[in-house]
Image (spheres, grey):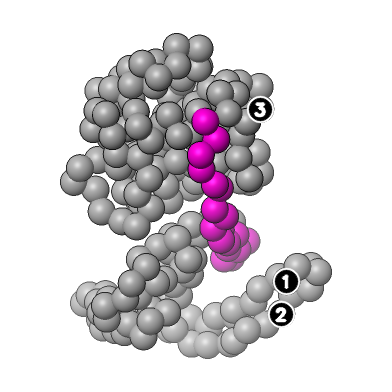
Amino acid sequence: MSLKPNKIRGVVISAREKSEFELVRKQIFECDQNITVIPFDEILHSPEILRDKIDLILTIGGDGSIAWLVGAYYKTFETIEGIKPIVPVVRPESVGYLKQLDLEGDKFKEGFRKLLTGDYEVVQRAVLQIIVDKQKLIAVNEVLISSSPHLGKFIVSIVNGKGITEIIAEILADGTMVATSIGSTAWALSHGGLLNLNEDTLELIFIGAMH
């Protein structure tokens, strides 16, 4: 899946700092002055912008920035339908495996011009909707859900593609972690990493694993 070359109408930028937003907007305009560029906050007030004007969402930071953006979208609209493809823009100090565009100067413009010419592909990632005590949550990277009282009983179930609820397990625990394939936690645990809990701390011990 890709857009037609040079047919990007607009992009949304999710940035922690205004200076980073302005830097990315400036570099986009140096590539194409006809592209509409708006901050992510405007989407939360006027979601129709995504439908009418925007083709891509650029988020500045590491993997956690993507998780935050999807979570903020879901918290506002209670769905992720309608969200556009997300392109990570990586700070020099950021970490993670989703690196695609580098924030610094010519590296960003070189990557963005590939978007303009359709030289990219969209990769889909799993996002899970979690319902705990009738409260809806979203798991993009990982969600740690604690229970009260101590040693609560969990019934873990999943709704399959046919809409049928399947019970996976019934357990006694202090909490549960839901992880998707977007996060380092999920990658490490799938390669045999250990999860150890005690009364005072949560410890995650990972073995080395290639993403």
Mark toward the start of the polypeptide (3 vs 2): 3
Residue at image mark 2? 166
Relative height, residue 11 to residue 195 (above, below)? above
Instruction: Report if residue 150 is visible in the image.
Output: no
In the displayed image of the protein, which residue is found farthest to the left? 93
Q: Dot 1: within a 10 Å radius of its alpha carbon, few (fewer than 14), some, or many (20 or more) residues?
A: few
Predominant SS of the magenta segment: loop
What amino acid type should be assigned to the residue bearing mark 3?
Answer: Arg
Q: Distance between the residues labelled 3 and 1?
A: 29 Å
Mark toward the start of the polypeptide (3 vs 1): 3
- Residue depicted at 50% across the width and 17% down the height: 35
Q: Dot 2: within a 10 Å radius of its alpha carbon, few (fewer than 14), some, or many (20 or more) residues?
A: few
Mark toward the start of the polypeptide (1 vs 2): 1
Q: Mark 3 against mark 2, which lies toward the viewer?
A: 3
Tell me if residue 91 is in the magenta stretch.
Answer: no
How far across and down, in percent of the image, does residue 156 sit? 59, 79
- Residue depicted at 34% across the width and 57% down the height: 97
In the displayed image of the protein, which residue is found farthest to the top? 33
What amino acid type should be assigned to the residue bearing mark 1?
Answer: Asn
- Residue depicted at 55% across the width and 41% down the height: 85
What amino acid type should be assigned to the residue bearing mark 2?
Answer: Glu
Dividing the picture into quadrants, the one containing residue 110 is top left
Locate the N terminus by quadrant. top right
Camera-nearest residue between 36 and 160:
36
Residue at image mark 3? 51
Residue at image mark 1? 160
Decide: marks 1, 2 in contact (CB < 8 A)?
yes
Span shown in magenta: 117-135
